[in-house]
Amino acid sequence: MAWPRTLTVGPSQADLPGYHRLAIQAAVDYVAAQGGGVVHLLAGRYELRGPVQLRSGVWLVGDGDDTHLVKAPVHATRLAADADWFDDVIEVADASGFRVGDGVILEGEPYGGGYAALNKEKRLVAGIDGHRLLLDRTVVKDYYTELEVTVSSLFPLVWIEQQHDCGVADLRLDGNRDQNTLLDGNHAGCIFMQYATRVEIRNVTAHHYFGDGFSWQVCPDVQVLDCRTHDHANLGLHPGSGSLRPTIRGCQSHHNEVGLFFCWGVADGLAEGNTLRDNRHWGIDIGHRDVRNLIRGNTIRCNGLAGVRFRSEPREHWLPHDNTLLDNHLQDNGGAGDGLAIWLQDKVNGTVLRGNRITDSGLGVTRTGVRIEPQVGTVELDDNRFEGIATPVDDRRPAS
């Protein structure tokens, strides 16, 4: 794809020289202020000490894998003085590993308790005075020292929040997993999006993040196209809560915990022509209120527990109803589990399995093609082919 060059970043001859976040962010902010355009990251290795925050109307574009964005090693310390919800200055035990511009996260149980997944706040370091860090925004909870709050330089490499009509293309994101600690996909990833609309990610490689590869939460109309995501601690592709109409096409997701994880309330999505392989648990995992999604023409192979799992939920209306698997090839799945290709659980209803090819290449790992648990509702099984499978369909529902 030919991109118009609006502003270049990187070597000395670039419009903004520098192989670091501050140069990239300055270019993004300038282009956004001009009404949008392209920031072109020229080939080279960029070490990121904080997130690149993408803006509406801006495309961040590289030179393929030769544009290499790497997360800096983590620095972690403990909170050394109480911080109330309105504070924008916090005191830490060891500030030596922080610099102005760094991304940080406060993590720990706020005073009075609360849901643990919400007890993480991403901020930027705006100033440093001894052991005191000035943050770009106040914290919004009370963090007290007896609750062992940590402050760590963890962040998404590219962060898209409350933006629209923007994108990332033609570059490589390295999470530097060996020199970092876990930050889950509700808060980060190589690319993390939240409350964003009409974002496109194209031809991006994301690898070795201590968390997820691509994660988006409450983001309608996201497109992830022709990307590669691998060797993450958690999920390769994570369309998250309330993300409507995602399109995931032509991607490769491998050597993660899960290849493609439909989170909460992902509806009317399309996953087409992807390869989901060699993931430790499931190739595809679909669950809480994930409805009317079409999973078509994918290759799902050599995943540890099953090729596709339909998750159980405590309430029937939370189940993943009315989803369709069409013309997929599932091969050699379930070697670390029960030998399942597709597993339907609970009272899931309205599932269509049509034209899928479910095979075992002779490894003897996929012993059951489709397992249907006793409470499952309607399942349409049509024109599926089974090769080398001892039990093509294990339907445990009571005979009518």
Image (cartoon, grey):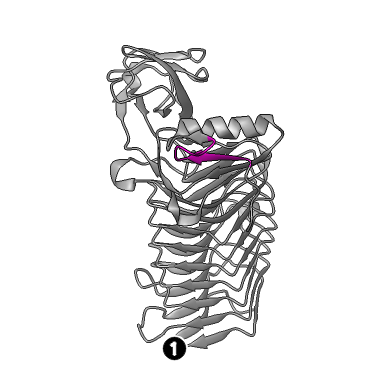
Tell me the residue that label 1 is attached to: 388
Between 392 and 23, the one lying in front of the other is 23
**Could you tell me which residue is drawn at 32 percent across and 35 percent down?**
74
Pick the quarter of the image with the C terminus: bottom right
Can residue 197 be seen in the rendering of this structure?
Answer: yes
Q: Which residues are magenta?
A: 6-15
| SS type, badge 1 | loop
| Residue at 41% across, 68% down | 303
Image position of 321 (left or right of 151): right
Residue toward you, 5 or 135? 5
Percent coordinates x, y for residue 370 in the rendering: 52, 76
Which residue is at a point 48% across and 26% down the rendered structure image? 123
Label 1 sits on what residue type? Answer: Gly
- Tell me: residue 22, above or below residue 305: above
136 lies left or right of 195: left
From this view, report whether residue 186 is shown above or below residue 151.
below
- Seen in the picture, residue 204 relative to 252 is either above or below; the reply is above
* Label 1 packing within 10 angstroms: few (<14), some (14-19), many (20+): many
Look at the magenta stretch and give its main secondary structure.
loop
Image-based side of 289 in relation to 131, left or right = right
Q: Quadrant of residue 45?
A: top left
Residue drawn at (53%, 38%) of the image:
159
Q: Position of residue 35 (x, y in %)?
A: 72, 34
**Can residue 115 be seen in the rendering of this structure?**
no
